[in-house]
Amino acid sequence: MRKAYLQLHGAVLLAGLTGILGRLITLNELMIVCYRLLFTAVTMWAVFSWRKAIHQVPRPLQFKIFLAAIFAATHWLTFYGAIKYANVSIALVCFALISFFTALLEPVLLRKRVNLVELSLGLVTLAGVYLIFHFDTRYTWGIALGVVSALFAALFPIMNREILKKTNVETLLVWQQSFGFVFVLFLIPFYGIAFETIRLTPTWADVGWLLVLSWLCSVWAFQLSGAALQKLSAFTVNLSYNLEPVYGILLAFIVYREDQLLNKWFYIGFCLIMAALLIHLLLLQQKKKKFESNFPN
């Protein structure tokens, strides 16, 4: 069991590392996502084909996966854009808004009842981001991209849940990475028009960091969380992934000393967000215990 917890938190830590690597790579956000998806897709096709884990996908389901891939790619584009225009800490604080957008979108898209507690906690998170945005205007564009990133980060997992009712996770991942890569390739000419100059080829150092991003933070993180799921409940895994922004911000403080770049309003807003996260974790834990007491094994 201890090994499973280590695997799980290793996967969450690797997820938090993506922001650190996004700042290290000198390419713009579009090319970071392009190469990440390319390397990840090729690796997953090789690994999952060898395991014979990839299933046939009917055309209607392919369209849904393609749509989810666009949302996922847009999330990564705006997330790395937020890092480039602000910093890792700002991007990850905005990422915490995923709970707010999920509470809004899930009832609409899945026709579920609105969870007022989750919506209220999401509004507290929104207030935390607003404090940072309102009192620190240096990062306006970066915060705006971070908020859009959180919106799309909430959208594609909702779609994935529906898709996974009809296929397995390996099939979803390989097609989602592949479709995402095609979508980003389509955007390159438009990016070139908008920004006039765009560097397409990475340096050798960039290639190294992109491989770390793809192999460690995508492929290996998936393997670790999958191994943890064999011993731990899906509830525990999903709960632990709420810590991703915390791990990422702590890493940014250690690696880039971003704590020296942020004013007091960042910390006030961050504390509000962490309070909402902690209350959410406690409520979910309480809900799990109540469920287990009502339906014992």
Image (tube, rainbow, N blue to C red):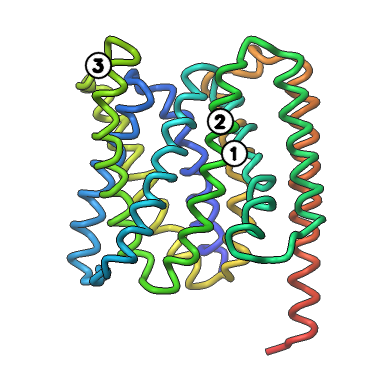
Identify the element where label 1 is drawn.
Answer: helix
Could you say which quadrant of the image residue 58 lies in? bottom left
Q: Earlier in the sequence, mark 1 or mark 3?
A: 3
Instruction: Tell me the residue that label 1 is attached to.
Output: 247
Instruction: Tell me the residue that label 2 is attached to.
Output: 251
The answer to whether 187 appears left or right of 5 in the picture is: left
The answer to whether 180 appears left or right of 272 in the picture is: left
Q: Which residue is drawn at 46% across and 60% down?
A: 160
Could you say which quadrant of the image residue 249 lies in? top right
Instruction: Tell me the residue that label 3 is attached to.
Output: 199
The answer to whether 175 appears left or right of 72 in the picture is: left
Q: Earlier in the sequence, mark 2 or mark 3?
A: 3
Spatial separation of the CA atoms under disc 1 and disc 3: 31 Å
Report if the CB atoms under discs 2 and 3 are less than 8 Å apart.
Answer: no
Q: Where is residue 192 in the image (x, y as percent from the top left)?
A: 27, 17
Q: Which residue is drawn at 53% across and 50% down?
A: 155
Observer-nearest of 74 and 50? 74
Identify the element where label 3 is drawn.
Answer: loop
Q: Where is residue 147 in the image (x, y as percent from the top left)?
A: 60, 32
Spatial separation of the CA atoms under disc 2 and disc 3: 28 Å
Q: Residue at x 71, y 29 (%)?
A: 129
Spatial separation of the CA atoms under disc 2 and disc 1: 6 Å
Label total for image: 3
Report if the CB atoms under discs 2 and 1 are less than 8 Å apart.
Answer: yes
Q: Position of residue 30 (x, y in %)?
A: 34, 27
Could you say which quadrant of the image residue 265 lies in? top right
